[in-house]
Image: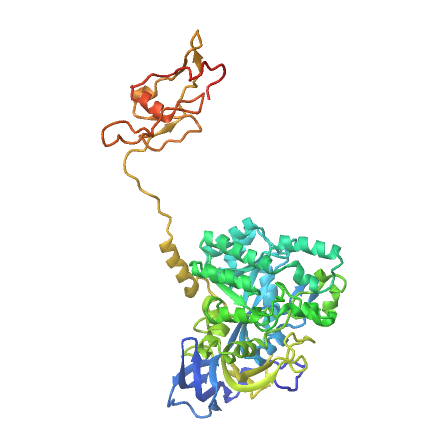
Amino acid sequence: MAARAQSTTPVRKVPIHLQSAQNRLLIKNGKVVNGDGIQDADVYIEEGIIKQVGNNLIVPGGSRLIDARGKYVIPGGIDTHTHLQLPFMGTTTADDFYTGTRAALAGGTTTIIDFVIPSKGQSLIEAYKQWRERADEKVACDYALHVAVTWWSPEVQQEMEELCRDHGINSFKMFMAYKDLWQLDDTELFEAFERCKQLGAVAQVHAENGDIIKENCKKLLAAGVTGPEGHEMSRPEEVEAEAVNRACVLANQVNCPLYIVHVMSKSAGEVVAEKRRQGIVVYGEPIAASLATDGKHYWNSCWRHAAAHVMGPPLRPDSTTPDYLMDLLANDDLQLTGTDHCTFSSAQKEMGKGDFTKIPNGVNGVEERMSLIWEKGVVSGKMDPTRFVAVTSMNAAKIFNMYPKKGCIAVGSDADIVIWDPKLEHTISAATHHSAVDFNIFEGITCRGGPEYVIANGRVTVDEGQVKAVQGYGSFIPTSPFAPFVYDAVTEREKVHQLIKVEREGRIVAVRNTMVPVVPQATSNGEALELNLSSVNGGEDVVAAADHHFASHQHFTRPPTSSGGRNMQDTTFSLSSEYPSMADVEEEAKGKKNSIQVKNPPGGKSSGPFW
């Protein structure tokens, strides 16, 4: 955003009796953009709700008029991935729920979804209540919550159900990394996916192979690699892609909808795209950082600069990654965007000087996301404004069951609206951003397009570029399970992939261990070897077999030749000195043959066992 004065004192919530006629707003002459189309229309808002969309609207007097001529009128952004006021790696993030949501509003985001992350062994319900207490009195915009599953037990399973039923949670995040802290093993992951499916929830995963990362970190530190570059080296691209693939395979076994958070690499994006082509219900979330910058910064000679970019999974040093991921996003191989906004000051990052594993993981992005995606996606020609709306708000609202309350401009929807000026040019800088952190990983990037007005729940919170955030103005948004956008696809897939047994005609031959052990018996002169068999089950039409034989049909020999002769490919020869061939067993069962006579082979008598 352009440089503007910032107040360090939070604006307190405005009492209802002091709120002005700004509760009635009329937006005229703009192009209304939804995820499915663009129309020239006016929008009338009252008491935080969109009341009319169309032309020649009749509205009450005293309404504030905003002229949106030459601009787009779009739904407020939904950031699906933030970590505000998070205790992590021995410290707490720089942005709390006020400064973080203020920054979100400044960039055109009107709803965030934060993560409840319980300590290992902590009650999920207890952690959820802690997050609500932190957020409710501070948020300047609406918010929802995901809940992380950081350990596994019957109690956790029960609490997942309670969270869905009573507390407005419909998504759970499992970690495949952070071994010995939050990581679940494959069996636990499988059971967690199964539980999510039962509850109608969306299963999310942080996809990296934590076992490999742990070993790589040991090797790098032992080799003297202690700087931020070691972070990327310890968790290369294939470590992310392997985990994404494994998560897809596990979730697919129980037809659980899967959501891959922070897709950071080309190969991880390719896995998501391929699994979607196979029909698996999986969604991929690239973030502002992976779409707009790369991991070459880890090799910067300035330790502070390099450490500021440390996040997990890391940014990739392949400079073609952002464009590649943007292509996947534009083509719906990836579906929506978040930020993983998790900020730590330079002083906090210095906790990892001398040991990259102790650098707090996290970067900014909640304010910059919308402008960066417009610049890298729309201005570049990769997507149109409707796709921009889909990946910044609509798809998120649908996946997490907030649509059409959020994610669209329609009668009855929340009045979360951005007047987007495609000609507004600004350069990103830590000197002018609204986050509490002292570094910006997008420093110096110029974006063409940004918010002129931001309306949250009917209130103008960014007015001609000036941020007017109010602490505590936002509300918690409960999210119900079984989102139709997600579970309709799951249901259709179950119809196609039903477990149906094969019905077969005819009698099935019984297989029993009724064979009497066969003992080779030689004649007195050693010239013949006879293998005696007992009668089989009273002569009934049942095949007897030893434990290691398997029979599923009554007939083992081929039919006669066209001339009526025996098919010469059939044989009664057996390699076993203990058991006869299956053909002989059948013959004896029919009473046609009582023994097998084996003569001396050509060349003389056999002095040993017959093979």
Relative to 180, does residue 523 appear above or below in the rendering? above
Q: Position of residue 436 (x, y in %)?
A: 67, 76
> Residue drawn at (55%, 50%), measured in percent from left and top?
186
Tell which of 20 and 214 is nearer to you.
214
Residue 406, visible in the rendered structure? no
- Residue 206: quarter of image: bottom right
Relative to 229, 602 lies left or right: left
Which quadrant, please, contains the N terminus? bottom right
> Residue drawn at (41%, 29%), measured in percent from left and top?
549
Q: Position of residue 137 (x, y in %)?
A: 60, 73
Residue closest to the far top: 524
Tell which of 535 and 327 is nearer to you.
327
Q: Position of residue 184 (x, y in %)?
A: 59, 53
Relative to 94, does residue 30 appear above or below in the rendering? below
Q: How is the image coloured?
A: rainbow
- Residue 210: quarter of image: bottom right
Q: Position of residue 108 (x, y in %)?
A: 54, 79
